[in-house]
Image (spheres, rainbow, N blue to C red):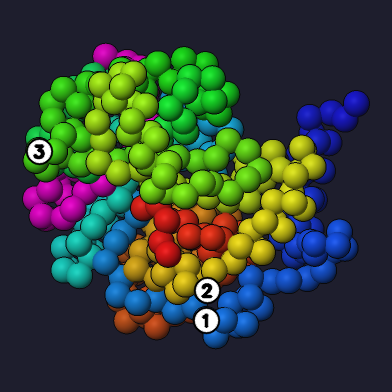
Amino acid sequence: MKSLKAQHHSLADARAQLAILVYGQDGSTIPISFRDKLAQSQSYPLKPGQIDTLQINIGKMCNQTCKHCHVDAGPDRKEIMTAETMQQCLDVLRQHEQLTVVDITGGAPEMNPNFRWFVEQLTRLDKQVIVRCNLTIIVANKKYADLPDFYRKHRVEVVSSLPFYAQDRTDRQRGDGVFDASIRALQLLNRIGYGKEGSGLKLNLVYNPSGAFLPSGQTALEKTFREVLRQRFSIEFNELFVITNMPISRFLDYLLMSGNYENYMEKLIHAYNPAAAANVMCRNTLSVGWDGYLYDCDFNQMLELKVNCLSQHIREFNDQMLKEREIVVDNHCYGCTAGSGSSCGGTIA
């Protein structure tokens, strides 16, 4: 039996090889790069449109260790954005009025000690603030129990992962007890108006498939989620975002170790949709890493693929350079362009 160290090196070697190769339907390994696929649909090079959103990862620390997490977040992660880097983000947002949306991610972003100060400053700048909340953080510790009231005070849009409307599938993907804790947190948010019609307090849920398959249609799945959560738990929400699992990080490890990588990549490639490629979120969004470096998207951030221009850090933000750059793509980008497409706001085509 291989040691853990040997297993780690095997996975690293496989990741390096599979970043170059994808698989044909006949089982042979053939190079079909995402760049070639874009070129076939006259979409390469991929260029930005109007950049209006900063998606800011303020730390990889999290109270959960989810199997599908592309950030590899967990309680043992120490990467945390400093107040200095947050201030650099605020300076850029103050100077560029076209940046109207700030999407705060983690880890569990609330675990950053400067999280509340950052949200307060963003509110003063009159930005639309989105927080990617894992829900369990609200009920995990008394120090976070007032988060729903904090969100309401600052009119934060809450986006929360709920892999399924049943306990077994949710707990298998995110850990024992996560489903029950998530339901309690959703009920607390509902109690103060989140997800309620006419409240103006947005509560959106996120669905990721639990295995090596593409998600169902967003409209039908949202209808089922809404009916089940309302009937069983009296829970209301605004929208369900359906997101395809990207073949990177923990999910890539699962694909490799389970022997599902080849079939999964085949599904993504054969479901490639030029309309989705034209509307990928990297065309209007910039991703900011916990250390301030800039990326075309959150997935490129986890692969350490920085933006392809000289303006690579938030402190040297250059709007013109960033608008003129070519977006960095690789084979994992098939995940965003399969079927109806996938973004942090759900399907895109």
Residue at the image position 43 percent from the left and 20 percent from the top:
179
Marks 1/2: CA distance? 8 Å
Left or right of residue 106: residue 270: right
Residue at label 3?
199
Label 1 residue SS: loop
For this rendering, which residue is in front, 349 or 154? 349
Q: Is residue 161 visible?
A: yes
The question of residue 132 being in magenta is answered with: yes
- Neighbor class of circle 1 (other Cα within 10 Å; few <14, some 14-19, many 20+) is some
Kind of residue at disc 1: Ser
Q: Tell which of 232 and 57 is nearer to you.
A: 232
Of residues 126 and 228, which is closer to you in this image? 228
Which residue in the structure is indicated by mark 2? 274
Kind of residue indicated by mark 2:
Pro
State the CA–CA distance, disc 3 to disc 2. Answer: 37 Å
Please report the residue visible at 75 percent of the width from the left and 62 percent of the height from the top.
22
Which amino acid type is shown beneath numbered disc 3? Ser
Horizontal side of residue 295 vs 234, given as left or right: right
Q: Is residue 309 visible?
A: no
Magenta-tinted stretch: 117-142
Which residue corresponds to mark 1?
43
Of callouts 3 and 1, which one flags the residue occurring earlier in the amino acid sequence? Answer: 1
Question: Residue 42 at x, y = what percent?
Answer: 55, 85
Residue 129 place in picture, x, y as percent: 21, 48
Q: Residue at x 50, y 41 (%)?
A: 208
Q: Are marks 3 and 2 in contact (CB under 8 Å)?
A: no
How far apart, in angstroms, are the residues tagged by discs 3 and 1?
41 Å
Label 1 with label 2: CB-CB less than 8 Å: yes
Q: Is residue 203 left or right of residue 136?
A: left
Helix or strand or loop: what does disc 3 sit on?
loop
